[in-house]
Image (cartoon, grey):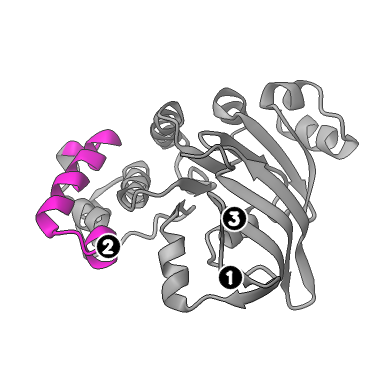
Amino acid sequence: MSDQAAVSLEGIHKFFGNFHALRGIDLTIAKGEVCVAIGPSGSGKSTLLRCINQIEVVSAGRVRICGTLQGYDERNGRLHELSPRAIDRQRRLTGMVFQRFNLFPHMTALGNVIEGPVQVKRIPKATARSHGRDLLARVGLADLADRYPNQLSGGQQQRVAIARALAMEPEVMLFDEPTSALDPELVGEVLDVIKDLAASGMTMILVTHEIGFAREVGDHLVFMDQGTIVEEGRPKQMLEAPKSTRTQAFLSKVL
């Protein structure tokens, strides 16, 4: 493996009509790094993740995952849009976990986990089932593989969603406020799984309001506001001595 960045964003802009959601984002995330993005609602954090995952198409700029330009092929200094099939292949580099679990309600926990490997990667079902059970065990759900989503708590559903994303063996995991839809007593079980992934060396970008968790697990903290990165740095340093007055004002309300 080379020492290139896991994620490199250069001059990312995103417009929704006349609304300028992202305004020239530059960000580099090293392999094995846990980057945590915080900021007020509407600051562009979730949009940034969706651009990295190619759910949204950037209006300008370049996204690279492990050195590979996303969404385009660059030839002779010109960008050529990739085919939908090629974009789908690239999207496997990232695993996305959403606020809402987005599980298939008609499939068991194990069925949800193996659907991508079987249908997209054409992995034999027996192999996928064995790996899927290992992943469910990793997130603490080994004994619930045959339960349907409506038989699981919110925290359990979110852990199935994490196992499902891991089943595609991504290079980078993206978490979009993974605990915001959970009852408070269920938050810890999901954060424990994310903490385990961080300890294993998984590269992650996590959008969250859990500031204490950001301090504990993050290597790299990003504060966003109005579509820009206002400040970034080491979590402990930024949370204890933010340089920007905007960061100071935000943290004074959430700490």
How would you rate the neighbour count of disc 3 (Cα within 10 Å): few for under 14, some for 14-19, many for 20 or more?
Answer: some
- Magenta segment includes 249: no
Image: magenta residue range = 116-142
- What's the residue type where badge 2 is placed? Lys
Label 3 sits on residue: 64
How would you rate the neighbour count of disc 2 (Cα within 10 Å): few for under 14, some for 14-19, many for 20 or more?
Answer: few
Residue at (81% x, 36% y) in the render? 247
Q: Secondary structure at mark 3?
A: strand
Residue 242 showing in the rendered view: yes
Residue at (55% x, 34% y) in the render? 33
Counting residues from the N terminus, which is met first, the one under dot 1 or under dot 2? Answer: 1
Contact, mark 1 vs mark 2 (Cβ under 8 Å): no
Label 1 sits on residue: 72
Q: Residue furthest right?
A: 245
In three-dimensional space, the C-alpha distance between marks 1 and 2, rounded to whole angstroms, equals 22 Å
- Magenta segment includes 136: yes
Counting residues from the N terminus, which is met first, the one under dot 3 or under dot 2? Answer: 3
- What's the residue type where badge 3 is placed? Arg
Q: Position of residue 68 (x, y in %)?
A: 54, 57
Q: Position of residue 246 (x, y in %)?
A: 86, 40
In the drawing, what numbered circle is on residue 121?
2
Q: Is residue 180 left or right of residue 169?
A: right
Q: Secondary structure at mark 2?
A: loop
- What's the residue type where badge 1 is placed? Tyr
Residue at (69% x, 21% y) in the render? 236
Q: Is residue 15 left or right of residue 123?
A: right
In the drawing, what numbered circle is on residue 177?
none
- Identify which residue, 53 or 47, lies in the foreground: 53
